[in-house]
Image: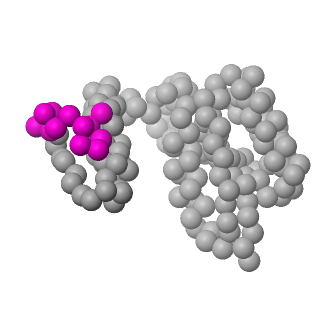
Amino acid sequence: MNEKRIVYFVSDRTGLTAESYGRSLLAQFPVLEFETRKIAFVDNADQANAAAREIGAAVDENPGQVLVFSTLVEEYIRDILEAVDVCVVNLFSEFIEPLEQHLGLKSAHKLGMSHHVFGENGYQSRLDAIDYALAHDDGVRPDQYADADLVLVGVSRCGKTPCSLYIAMNFSL
């Protein structure tokens, strides 16, 4: 059984959270093959309608084979997407509502709040590390290596660049 499913990751920001968590969930279904598509920065009705049209077209071409993971915050934007006849897993509402009940508080329901968990300094630290990794890639600017916490050395084409970006994005807080 090697069925191919089309999976959309839809977000009002970059889509990294929807994609990361969605892929983690899909990994539990190894017998299926997934073709993934990301629609990012869906933060108004026009963009939501465009996303809904694209997903609707995919549903028309592949009935029963389309799945959507969403991290949309605004309810009116979620409603536009959920009007399409497709399975939508809204990761935001799936977790926020139980947390609101448990904590006895309403969430802020604001876009772009995820970097506040680590504070502005942590978020900026991650951006600075990514910028440094890119600016010093492939042996550029050896006079600034003293500023690095880690220097990767290896033969050509062995994966130093993706490794340095992974480290910058995941361990720079």
Q: Residue at x 65, y 52 (%)?
A: 36
Q: Is residue 138 magenta?
A: yes
Q: Is residue 92 left or right of residue 150?
A: right
Judging depth in this view, the residue of 109 and 77 nearest the camera is: 77
Judging depth in this view, the residue of 91 and 49 nearest the camera is: 49
| Image position, residue 165 (x, y; %) | 35, 45
- Residue 18 visible at all: yes
Q: Is residue 115 left or right of residue 16?
A: left
Q: Is residue 86 left or right of residue 169?
A: right
Tell me the colour scheme of the image.
one colour
Quarter containing the N terminus: bottom right
Q: Which residues are magenta?
A: 135-146
Q: Is residue 145 magenta?
A: yes
| Image position, residue 113 (x, y; %) | 46, 28
| Image position, residue 78 (x, y; %) | 71, 33
Asked if residue 28 is positioned above or below residue 84 in the image, the reply reads below
Quarter containing the C terminus: top left
Q: Residue at x 40, y 31 (%)?
A: 115
Prevailing SS of the magenta stretch: helix
Judging depth in this view, the residue of 171 and 106 nearest the camera is: 171
- Residue 89 visible at all: no
Looking at this rendering, what residue extends furthest in the front direction?
Answer: 156
Q: Quadrant of residue 129?
A: top left
Q: Residue at x 78, y 42 (%)?
A: 55
